[in-house]
Image (tube, rainbow, N blue to C red):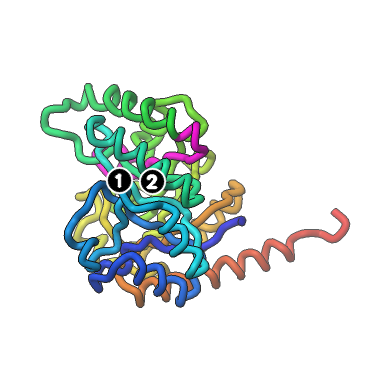
Amino acid sequence: MSIEVGINLEYIRCEDKPFIAGIHRASKMGYRWVEPMVHNGRELLSEAGYFHSVSLDEDPLLVRDILQQYCVRASALSAHCPLMRPEVSVPYLEKAIRFAAALGAPCVNTDEGIRPSWVTREEAHDIMRYTLKAVLRIAERHGVYVGIEDHQEFSKTTEGLLRIANLVDSPMLRINYDTGNALLGGEDPYAGLEAVASRLIHVHAKDISMEHAATEQGKVSGTPVGCACGDGLIDWRRVITILQKHNFNGVLSVECGTPDQAERSLRHLNTLLEALDEHNSLRIVPGS
């Protein structure tokens, strides 16, 4: 697969469209990988067709059929939950892992979540370790990775992200790196990407506009979506070069706010990938 470009379905949220509309539009743009968001139980907006999230109570094979109908595959499931609340996150992530396995998605992405007021910083990592130990038993059985994202109090730093990703000794515990969250959290996204490269399973291709950074950089631990890739502060040529250097084999899942941004992101990233692939092929000496 090498490096390919996918889309997180958050891009369709601005239009109040359902899951199938997001899949259809992504396919028409030329995306071949999508990252659906899942939720527990039933909720009004999705049931009424005004939101793109998919219930884990749906038949996953039905969802798989929809993906196949539009010639796309799931790069991951967006299954964010509070790791410091095991009564919530353990059953939710276990269900998401089984759902991902049925879809053929290689991983579920999550983050630490917001630390509950009754959990101290000293207690937090022990609770997260318990949650991840319980969840990873299921992940190992089903062959689905759990990708920890940089997107809250502890994981907003590269050091904190790696600490969570090393709480449990399991080959299925990996990292879903979000470039935009790293930038807004005050990290150097390129140094961070280098540091976590050996643990990567998935990448959120999130760009941040100059205006957005001026308002929130260093003040937040992340943001739901960014601008179109190529319109913001992230140097995507540099990101791709780092990934290629570390032999990353996976998907850059675009996280942007509108269909227009999704279309322009795909065009920008594919142009860079094609140019870098051509450049790398020219560097190969015949007969070497």
Whole-percent x and y of residue 27?
46, 72
Q: Please, what is the three-letter code of the amino acid marked with disc 2?
A: Asn
The N terminus sits in image quarter: bottom right
Q: Nearer the viewer, residue 94 or 78?
A: 94
167 shown above or below 75: above
Whole-percent x and y of residue 61?
45, 54
Q: Nearer the viewer, residue 32 or 276?
A: 32
Q: Nearer the viewer, residue 159 or 107?
A: 107
Marks 1 and 2: CB-CB under 8 Å?
yes
- Give the number of the disc on residue 80: 1
210 shown above or below 61: below
Q: Please, what is the three-letter code of the amino acid marked with disc 1?
A: His
The magenta stretch is 139-157
Q: Which residue is mark 2?
A: 109
17 shown above or below 63: below
Could you tell whether 12 is left or right of 144 in the image? left
- Give the number of the disc on residue 119: none
Query: Which element type, helix, strand or loop, lies under badge 1?
Result: loop
- Tell me if residue 123 can be seen: yes
Whole-percent x and y of residue 144?
48, 40
